[in-house]
Image (cartoon, rainbow, N blue to C red):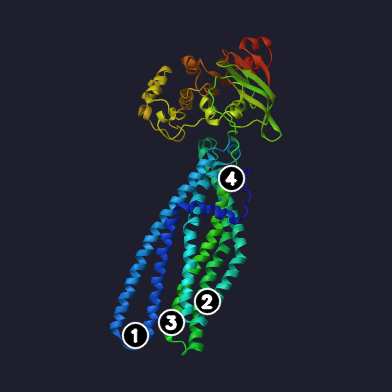
Amino acid sequence: MGVNRYDQDEKNTVFKLSNYKRGLAYIKQYKRELLIIFILNCISVIATLFITKMLQYVIDEVIPNNNYQRLFIIVVGAFLLVLISIILTKVYSIKLAQANQNIVEDIKNDLFSHIQYLSFKYYDTRPNGKILVRLTEYAEDVSTLITDKLVTTFLNLFNMLIILVFMFLTNVKLTLIAIVGIIVLSLIFAVTAKIKRKYKLLINNKNSNLNAYLVESLRGMQTTQSFNRQENNQKIFNNLSKSWRDASCSFIKFGNIGWCSVQIMSHLVSATIYFVGAMFLYPSVSVGAIVAMGNYSSNFWQPIEDLFKTLDEFINSMTYLERIFETIDEPIEIIDTENAIDTSIEGLVEFKNVTFSYIQNREVLDNISFRIEPQEKVAIVGETGSGKTTITNLIGRFYDVDSGNILIDGKNIKNIKLNSLRKQVAVMQQENYLFSTSIMKNLKYGTDKITDEEVIEICKKLNVHDWIMNLENGYNTKLSGNGKSLSDGEKQILCYIRTIINNPKILIFDEATSKIDVRTEKMLQNLTKELIKNKTVITIAHRLDSIINSDKIFFIKEKRISEIGTHKELMNLRGDYYELYNSQEKVLY
């Protein structure tokens, strides 16, 4: 997926038959079920065609000879064939639906499995709605392409072949009329196929844009109402919706050509068969044979109509399949190197000449170097946008550096397995998320090696146990909507505790207490001293009075570290830190 916004169309994919072949891999484990479906349908079709053959026999032989006993037997036989056909159709329809849902599940699992490992950079530049639509609408449609449409195509081709055999056995000349009709329809489809694909890609883009804006709007609904932006947003949504509608209407103009052409050709061929049979071939061709050919012709055009509908849907679904594989093929940039190892971290962190940029040629950090000793308590401060959060993201290896090296305990973090690194480096980011589950499960989200009792004990030490117990169901209180029932400060407290509960060797707090009042913040800091005393702690804070007791303070300015020292040392230096600290003091007092 290219970098884009909700109002920017994605780059069109290129049709490759190899994508469809790749999609067929999903049916391998269901081959037996699909074979049974195919056989059941074939039996059902043959049973139906025999009824027409029996009709020809009744017209030409039974009725002229007044053989009513044989007529009764044939009627009973026809009834049984109809019953068998209905039962078989019901059975194979159920089995086909089950196979279809299994493949939906497989595609969604593969997609979700892949997107979980894509880097932060992937999500930084892509609207969530454009990713979401691939996991829902696209995956569900593609599954029918791989199962239902594939099986239906083979069944329709088989049905056409069987009907043609019956038609040739009945009369060759009249059969040729139907074959001419097929040739004409094939030419019509070939001409319109590329046009349909063009408009379907446009529909997908407009639908994707609409989904992207919808997700963004729902996430920001409180902000929208706060700024009274409902009317403006409605106009944007209406314009996006109109673009989707216009693209859909353009597609419909060409989408109906196939269906209309089949309908017209069906009636034209049937009428021609009756006309030619009656005017030029009768009486050398019996009335029963002409009626049978007309009946076969009607049956013959139904699978052709279904086939052309399937081909139209094939064009639609292929554009979805291409988008799905585009996502699955998105490279996972942050991966273990070939020689990566599991290791026990002590907590020494070093940056050596690190340069990093989110966008090419726009450095956020420029040749930065520093060292943090094990169990040291360090603060990183600086102006907004100076690169403080970027440093913490690089330590957790959520991004890879452009140049230079980041070392932990003397080892390049690229040579430490991601699983091992992230189990021992816990990052509480500026924007944290509480999941729609209980408070207990949210607190234990990062580890399965701690019991409920141990969590409760930690909460008691941090003086939040009574507050949690006063909630509706205590630790079993269900949260929803990113903990919307809690205040921002309460949510931040839970995220703060969740980070500590992981028991990492390196703790990184990025504005961890920015939404907590000063009194509660100091209380938490005092109560957590014992829990974090043997850990390397890196804190980013705008409130400088909260980090004055740090062992070391880094001041970031103009993409580099301009000052390093304790609070006292930096105040005596009377530089950037001194000015920033005094500016905050003036604001507070």
Q: CA distance from mark 3 to mark 4?
A: 56 Å
Instruction: Write down the quadrant of residue 81 in the picture.
Output: bottom left
Q: Give the camera-side residue of 485 and 398.
A: 398
Task: Name the amino acid type tagged 3.
Answer: Val
Disc 2 designates what residue?
A: 178
Asked if the residue at tag 2 contacts the one at tag 4, i.e. Cβ–Cβ closer than 8 Å, the answer is: no
Q: Which mark is residue 62?
A: 1
Residue 329, disc: 4
- Numbered disc in front, either 1 or 3: 1
In the visual, does 487 lie left or right of 541?
left
- Disc 2 to disc 1, C-alpha distance: 29 Å
Q: CA distance from mark 2 to mark 3?
A: 15 Å
How far separated are the C-alphas under marks 1 and 4?
Answer: 65 Å
Who is closer to the viewer here, 312 or 488? 312
Secondary structure at badge 4 equals: loop
Residue 39 percent location from the top left of the image: 41, 64
Residue at 54% x, 65% y: name it.
Answer: 256
Q: Amino acid at mark 1?
A: Val
- N-terminal label among 2 and 1: 1
Q: Amino acid at mark 4?
A: Asp
Residue drawn at point x = 57 percent, y = 60 percent: 251
On residue 291, which mark appears?
A: 3
x%, y% of residue 491? 47, 27
124 or 92, nearer to the observer: 92
